[in-house]
Amino acid sequence: MTAQPAAPSHPVAERVLVVDDEPDIVALVAYHLAKVGYRVSTAASGADALAMARQDRPALIVLDLMLPGMSGYDVLEQLRADEATRGIAVLMLTARREEQDRITGLSLGADDYLTKPFSPQELVLRVQAILRRVAAPESTPNDRVSIGPITIDRAAHRVSVNGAEVELTPTEYKLLATLAERRGRVQGRGHLLETVWEAAPDIQTRTVDMHIQRLRAKLGPAGEIIETVRGFGYRIRGAQSKA
């Protein structure tokens, strides 16, 4: 049985920005997101999307790749470069099916990638899965995990290296937290897809690799604590302590 999208459980539903220059696609996506309770705004160009992202600070952006004047790649790159918008989750929606397009989007910081034609129900489920990564976990204010120079504040969803905060996307944070919780144990790519992306374990394992690559880059030298176990997946080494 296919899972049915559920209405957001937060008192005030999250805002989702839908960016596409095809009116039919915009109407379809907006309808199904609004139907389950999200507050939806729309944009038809990259420039408008960036302006609305800075003004409205949506929780998530559904971003088409092929936009007039400025591609979805350009929009994503600018979102991640701007301190005001770098934390906004992004689901890329595109007709391009080539693996390189997917890799490019993920390497620029997209949280997920869905190709057209798509199931509106699947899109809603993916949006919900991404936003669950954004939501703060139930934990105490002092619930912190330290592994070497890396500190994960699970209550605030913040990560720091040697005391300096590192800006991570919701998916990058969830990936790091998952590896940290299971330190010393190898986490297969399929298992990480199930846990972090809530996806079937037999699809798009390159998604994990690209996020690990970005995560290591953001952590700097501390990123070496994430080990690649060839043929299996990844693990975090090092001792863990709780503050």
Image (cartoon, rainbow, N blue to C red):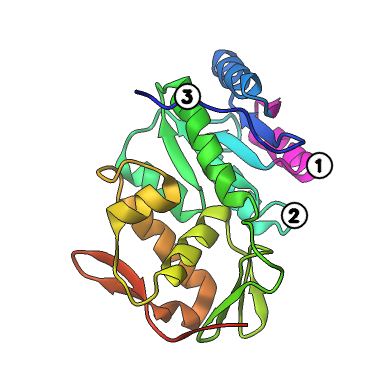
x and y, in percent, of residue 226 in the image: 39, 75
What quarter of the picture does the N terminus occupy? top left
Please tell me whether residue 107 is drawn above or below residue 18 in the rendered image.
Answer: below
Q: Which residue has dot 1 on it?
A: 55
Q: Residue at x 52, y 75 (%)?
A: 219
Tags 3 and 1 touching, CB below 8 Å: no
The answer, for residue 74, to whether it is visible in the render is: no
Question: Closer to us: mark 3 or mark 1?
Answer: 3
Which amino acid, by three-letter code, is at mark 3?
Answer: Gln
Q: CA distance from mark 3 to mark 2?
A: 33 Å
Within 10 Å of the Cα at label 1, are there few (<14), some (14-19), or many (20+) other Cα atoms?
few
Q: Residue at x 81, y 42 (%)?
A: 55
What quarter of the picture does the C terminus occupy? bottom right
Please tell me whether residue 65 is drawn above or below residue 158 in the rendered image.
Answer: above
Q: CA distance from mark 3 to mark 1?
A: 32 Å
**Residue 192 shown left or right of residue 161 in the figure:** left
Image: magenta residue range: 39-58
Mark 3 residue element: loop
Mark 2 residue element: loop
Question: Closer to us: mark 3 or mark 2?
Answer: 3
Tags 3 and 2 touching, CB below 8 Å: no
Mark 1 residue element: helix
Outermost residue to the right:
55
Q: Which residue has dot 2 on it?
A: 84
Q: Report if residue 180 lies within the magenta region.
A: no
Please tell me whether residue 71 is drawn above or below residue 18 in the rendered image.
Answer: below
Outermost residue to the left:
231
